[in-house]
Image: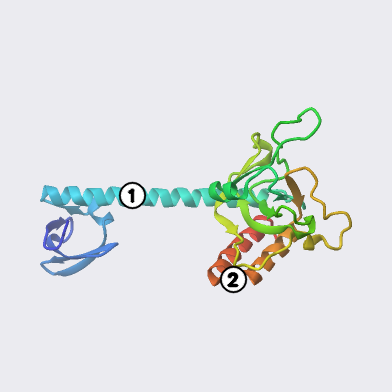
Amino acid sequence: MNLIGKKVTHKKFGLGTIREVQTNKVRVDFKYGIKTFAYPESFEKFFEVPDQNTKAYIQVRIEESNRLKALEQEEKSREELRRDYARKLKIKENSHAVFGMRVNNLNDVLENWSVSTGTYLSGANKGKPRIPKVLNMNSACLLTVKAEGQKEADRTIAGIFMASEDFIGLECQNGIICAHEKHRIIWEAEDEDIRFWDYFSGETGLSNWGNCEIKYISNKTIKKILEDMMRLAFHAEKKKEICEFYNYFLEMNHM
C-alpha cells in the first residue's frame, strides 16, 4: 500500500500527512513542520490512523517488525548461552574428528551435512553406533577420501565442518553428528589437493587408516590444516569463508 498522502494523528503534534516512507523511518508533515519517526514502531504508541485499511496495513508491518525483533533477541540470547558454555567447556587436546568415508558416502554427507561415526567393531557394544564421547560443540569434523586403488598415503581432504552449536558427544546415542549451520567448507576440484597423512609424516605407524570410520586428532593439527586451506583455496570468497571458520574454531577452543 502507498502511504504517501495518508492522514494520521500524532499524540503530541496533532493531525499530519505522511510525506515519505523508507525502510525504517517515516516523515510526517504537521502544521508546524515535518517530523521524522521510526517506522513502523512509532505507530504502535504515538499515532492514530483514521482510515481502517491504512491502519490494518500498518498493523501488519508492526507485527512483522516485532516478530523480527523477537527472533533477533532470541538469536542474541542463544549466542550468549553458546559463548558462556564455550568459555566453561574443558578443552581436550584430541577433541576433533576425521572421517575416512568407509561407512559414509561423501556426496550424502555434503548434501545432508551430517556424518555417521560408524559402529563399534567388537566388545559388548559391537554393532551399536559409536558414541563420540570426546566431541562437543567446539569440535571440527574433517572429511577425507581415498580413491579406489590409491595408496593410503594419498588420502586427501574433501571438506570440514564444525559440529552444531548444541552438540554434546556423550548425548549422541545415534552416532550422527550434524554440522554447524554456517561453518562448513567443501574442498573442491579447483582447490589444490591437501594430503591428509602429510600432517603426520614425522610420526611412525600413523599412515594406516584401520577399520574404524572415525579417528580423533588434535587442536594444533586442525589449526594447521585450516591455515593451509586458507592459503591454498582457489577463490577469494572461499578464503574468506575459511578465515571465518578459523576464527570461530580458535574462539571455541580457547586458542
SS at circle 1: helix
SS at circle 2: loop
Which image quarter: residue 153?
Answer: bottom right
Taking the image as shown, residue 217 lies to the left or right of residue 106, namely right
Q: Which residue is drawn at 87% across and 59% down?
A: 203
89 lies above or below 6? above
Label 2 crowd bin: few (<14), some (14–19), many (20+), radius 10 Å: some
Query: In the depicted view, which residue is nearer to us: 146 or 34?
Result: 146
Give residue 120's position: percent from left, percent from top: 75, 35
Q: Residue at x 73, y 31 (%)?
A: 127
Give residue 152's position: percent from left, percent from top: 78, 55
Identify the residue under disc 2: 234
Which image quarter: residue 248?
Answer: bottom right
35 lies above or below 120? below
Identified by mark 1, the residue type is Asn
Give residue 196's position: percent from left, percent from top: 74, 59
Say the numbered circle drawn on residue 24: none
Identify the residue under disc 1: 66
